[in-house]
Amino acid sequence: MAGSLNKVLLIGRLGADPEVKQMVNGKSVARLSLATSQSWKDKNTGEKKEKTEWHRVVVFNEGLVNVVQQYLKKGAQVYVEGQLSTRKWKDEQTGQDKYSTEILIQGYNSSLTMLGGGNQNNMPSQDTKQNFEDGGVNQNDLDDDIPF
């Protein structure tokens, strides 16, 4: 279809350590649970409110999977660019069709950037930049006060 675009841009923090698995074809895939949040002040009560959205991110780029496995931990802040994809699967217990919507990081139109914050003990120094053909990965010193 001409004139369409499937692009997702997110900045958030990992809610758990990444899960890396081996696929049947021998390549690795990484799954991330990414939280984004927004906060506001209730106009009527003056109370601070917050809403968190959880996103499933699946990384297929082999170079990025290695970086995710080596450097990312729960609480790490990342910027991701990818595509939305919804897949259908059968629940083995009930036999019902289920659907999962994920952000796919694969190919040349995707990237993952480590932003800093969270667990930085194992991250490369600020001066270290790692770029991969399938998606730029670099370490920046951008630490926002996101409450999780």
Image (cartoon, rainbow, N blue to C red):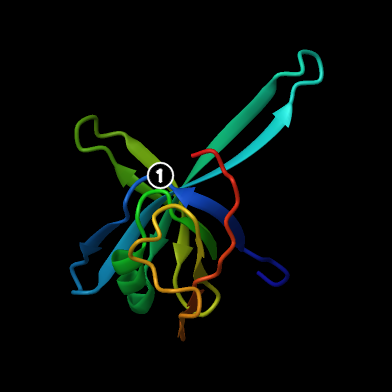
* Element type at mark 1: loop
Name the one closer to the observer, 124 or 100. Answer: 124
Residue beneath the point at 36% across and 39% down: 98
Name the one closer to the observer, 2 or 28. Answer: 28
123 up-or-down from 51: above or below = below
Farthest residue, direction bottom:
133
Farthest residue, direction top:
45
42 up-or-down from 50: above or below = above
Residue 50 falls in which quadrant of the image? top right
Q: Where does label 1 land, which residue?
A: 15
Q: In this image, 54 relative to 145: left or right?
A: left
Residue 107 x, y percent position in the rendering:
47, 77
Residue beneath the point at 61% across and 63% down: 6
Name the one closer to the observer, 120 or 21. Answer: 120
Q: In this image, 89 relative to 118: left or right?
A: left
Q: Amino acid at mark 1?
A: Gly
- Total labels: the figure holds 1
Q: Determine crowd level at label 1: few under 14, some 14-19, many 20+ residues with C-alpha closer than 10 A.
A: some
Residue 30 x, y percent position in the rendering:
32, 62
